[in-house]
């Protein structure tokens, strides 16, 4: 797969993307024996990329499904010293979470070092569905379910919920394609109720299944293929 050389260097852990651009500008990076220019593309799997005469070894892509517990930050690091999802996944690869999940929400978080896949998942064009189970502060009514399916305007944009299903007196399952901060909670505030607990149970074709809180696993090859197919990669 063709990628900009500075991106390949950053993914391989050689340097940050900005520093990689400096290395290229200084003439220290070659592809198949030829000095490259900033913005030039290469294939990390097929081309021979050298920095200061030393080969760049591409980091293998890993895909990890985590059941995020309560009060864990969906980030690589936290300036306040709070526990992050990265703390729960002790792998050598430089993985990062795809998208966000509120600290006081639980459930499925995907971590990867595949930047192209992560960007596709977060891009509105590909409409990656996010499925949640929300426990509300008031009973679920037929009117609430109907309004969810018809759509609610949140901050001047209409949000449509799909596959809406009542799971209990105060519990509802729904899928949305929005990625805005606190969007599910704001959606229910617009319906006159509040979310007491929120769990993400699916992300695109990926399902949380029976994975326990705080536990994680690598995606199977079949899951990776299914995910890449859904994202047209």
Image (tube, rainbow, N blue to C red):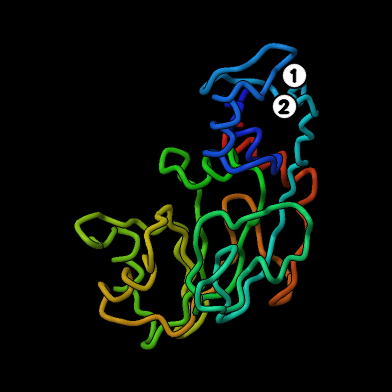
- Of residues 124 and 171, the one drawn nearer to the viewer in this rendering: 124
Image location (x, y in percent) of residue 225:
72, 39
Pointer 1 with pointer 2, Cβ within 8 A: yes
Q: Quadrant of residue 190?
A: bottom left
Q: Which mark is residue 184?
A: none
Image location (x, y in percent) of residue 212:
73, 76
Q: How many marks?
A: 2
Image location (x, y in percent) of residue 7:
59, 34
Helix, strand or loop at disc 1? loop
Mark 2 surroundings within 10 Å by alpha-carbon count, few (fewer than 14), some (14 through 19), many (20 or more):
many
78 left or right of 60?
A: left
94 left or right of 70?
A: right
- Of residues 118 and 38, the one drawn nearer to the viewer in this rendering: 38
Helix, strand or loop at disc 2? loop
Give the position of the C terminus as an image quadrant.
Answer: top right
The residue depicted at 75 percent of the width and 52 percent of the height is: 93
- Residue 20 in the image: above or below residue 130: above
Q: Which mark is residue 44?
A: 2
Q: Quadrant of residue 45?
A: top right
- Residue 19 in the image: above or below residue 149: above
- Residue 24 in the image: above or below residue 74: above
Mark 1 surroundings within 10 Å by alpha-carbon count, few (fewer than 14), some (14 through 19), many (20 or more):
few
The residue depicted at 31 percent of the width and 71 percent of the height is: 186
- Of residues 181 and 15, the one drawn nearer to the viewer in this rendering: 15
| Disc 1 target residue | 47
70 left or right of 217?
A: left
User: How far is the residue under mark 1 from the one under mark 2?
Assistant: 6 Å
The residue depicted at 58 percent of the width and 43 percent of the height is: 16
Give the position of the N terminus as an image quadrant.
Answer: top right
The residue depicted at 55 percent of the width and 64 percent of the height is: 75
Image location (x, y in percent) of residue 138:
36, 87
């Amino acid at each position: 797969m063709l990628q900009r050389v500075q991106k390949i260097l950053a993914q391989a852990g050689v340097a940050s993307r900005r520093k990689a651009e400096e290395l290229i500008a200084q003439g220290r990076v070659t592809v198949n024996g030829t000095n490259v220019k900033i913005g030039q593309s290469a294939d990390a799997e097929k081309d021979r990329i050298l920095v200061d005469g030393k080969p760049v070894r591409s980091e293998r892509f890993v895909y990890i499904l985590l059941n995020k517990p309560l009060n864990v930050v969906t980030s690589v690091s936290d300036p306040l010293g709070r526990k992050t999802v990265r703390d729960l996944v002790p792998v050598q690869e430089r993985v990062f979470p795809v998208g966000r999940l509120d600290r006081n929400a639980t459930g499925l978080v995907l971590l990867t070092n595949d930047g192209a896949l992560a960007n596709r998942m977060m891009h509105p064009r590909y409409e990656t569905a996010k499925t949640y189970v929300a426990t509300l502060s008031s009973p679920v009514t037929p009117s609430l379910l109907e309004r969810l399916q018809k759509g609610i305007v949140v901050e001047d944009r209409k949000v449509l919920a799909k596959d809406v299903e009542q799971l209990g007196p105060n519990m509802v399952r729904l899928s949305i394609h929005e990625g805005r901060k606190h969007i599910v909670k704001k959606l229910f505030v617009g319906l006159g109720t509040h979310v007491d607990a929120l769990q993400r149970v699916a992300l695109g074709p990926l399902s949380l299944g029976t994975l326990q809180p705080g536990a994680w696993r690598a995606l199977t090859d079949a899951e990776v293929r299914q995910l890449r197919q859904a994202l047209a990669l």
